[in-house]
Amino acid sequence: MRLLEKVDCARILIQRSVMNEAAGNNGFAAALQRRFVSRASQAALRTLSYMDRQLHDSSLYGITLANPYKALSEVQARGRVLRSWAYQGWLVTGFEEVQQLMRSENMSNDLRSSKFMVRLVKSAVGSGRVPTIDNPSMLNQDPPDHTRLRRLVNEGFTHKFVQSLEPRIEAICTKLLDDVGSREFDVVQALAKPLPAIVIAEMLGVPERDYEQFQRCSADLLAITRFDSPELMRRAGVATEEMDDYFAGLAQEKRDNPGDDLISELVRLESEEDRLTLPELYSLCILILVAGHETTTRLIGTGLMLLLKHPAQLAVLREDLSLLPNAIEEMLRYEPPLQFTPRLVKKSFDFKGHQLQTGQATLLSIAAANRDPLANDDPHTFNILREEVRHVTFGYGPHLCLGMSLARLEARVVFSALLERFETMSWMDREPDWRREFFFRGVNSLNVRV
């Protein structure tokens, strides 16, 4: 069978499997149906990825956790905008190209604009709710709703307000390090995970008694991107429902006893006409919960790992902590916590000689863009002294990350504390323990001796 005929067959297999999934049924039959859909879709995806490799070497299927950048670099060398059958659209790897599409009015963040994507995700999750579809946050919405919602929460993330949090962040960091009680410890579990979670929980107004539930649900919610594991995706749906219920109860508490926190402020906006609905309130809280600490956890873990793997640069940083802000930018560029971000073509248009059609998915590779040699010289070298660090780790355009000032501040506080407190620090692991995710990148653990 010719290659294009195989492509068509695989595409039809995915589409029919997804469309025939009996999400509304319960019991054993429904479970068997979901298992069939999952296996059929995965087989078709492998076929489509194979076709991508044969036609123009653009597939990322099977990308390694240890070093995804080698494959990304090879793909980028073959084309900065490539047609992808596996992703039902396009793969974009160039820095300038990613920036342009991130700010393009022809592109959409709303997955609901693609019936195929809705069916694909819904079939994997089953009967559970999908936050990006059933009640999308502002991250998965377009103007004017995105503009309205972003304006409502913007005050809570202004640079001036975030900088005012520095003393509290320092106090939390000191307490966590004081509690270590050993010369050997896991930085991720002892510091990188709890600190950002505590900070964002306090900003939202989440009681300390609920921190454990807060972190567990946040980890489950990220699994909505795990298309290779329908079970994990279903857990994300369950976590969404649990968080909706939780924030409904917490919002009621804030109505009765408002405090000086973000949820109290958002609840106040409910009473203003056309400002904030209950579903929007819950989706905003979930977004802030996940985005507010998961990416910062990865930044701290991988950032410290990079310094420990480059002892000469670590020594330079110890001698001059004024280099820390630039070092953090290089960490963000070299190992971005978010590796890819999807967009959908809202309106057909010509882009760099390629015809992007309405409804097509476009996978923007942040990781490849950050290591584009046209944007950064010697991009595969980690260099905290790099004069101009160019990256799109926090996005670009209308969806530029609201929490980027907070993430930078938390990282700066943590690295300053570690370098000032410990005269020496060594990495005890032989290899990084990478978390098994495609869209996100970070380490599960980072065991050090100080």
Image (spheres, rainbow, N blue to C red):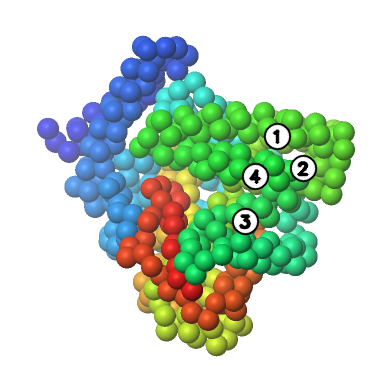
Q: Residues within 10 Å of mark 4 (few under 14, many from 20)?
A: some
Would you place residue 73 above or below residue 248 in this image?
below
Q: Nearer the viewer, mark 3 or mark 4?
A: 4
**Percent from the top left, x then y, of residue 111?**
52, 36
The amino acid type found where label 1 is placed reads Phe
Would you place residue 25 above or below residue 103 in this image?
above
Please name the residue that numbered disc 1 is placed on: 247
Please name the residue that numbered disc 3 is placed on: 196
**Percent from the top left, x then y, of residue 341?**
48, 49
Q: Residues within 10 Å of mark 1 (few under 14, many from 20)?
A: some
Q: Nearer the viewer, mark 3 or mark 2?
A: 3
Q: Element under label 2?
A: helix
Cα distance, mark 3 to mark 1?
19 Å
Q: Residues within 10 Å of mark 2 (few under 14, many from 20)?
A: many
Tag 3 near tag 4, CB within 8 Å? no
Residue 49 visible in image? yes
> Which residue is situated farthest in the left direction here?
1
**Percent from the top left, x then y, of residue 104?**
55, 51
Please name the residue that numbered disc 2 is placed on: 263
Indicate which disc, 3 or 1, sits on the residue closer to the N terminus: 3
The amino acid type found where label 4 is placed reads Tyr
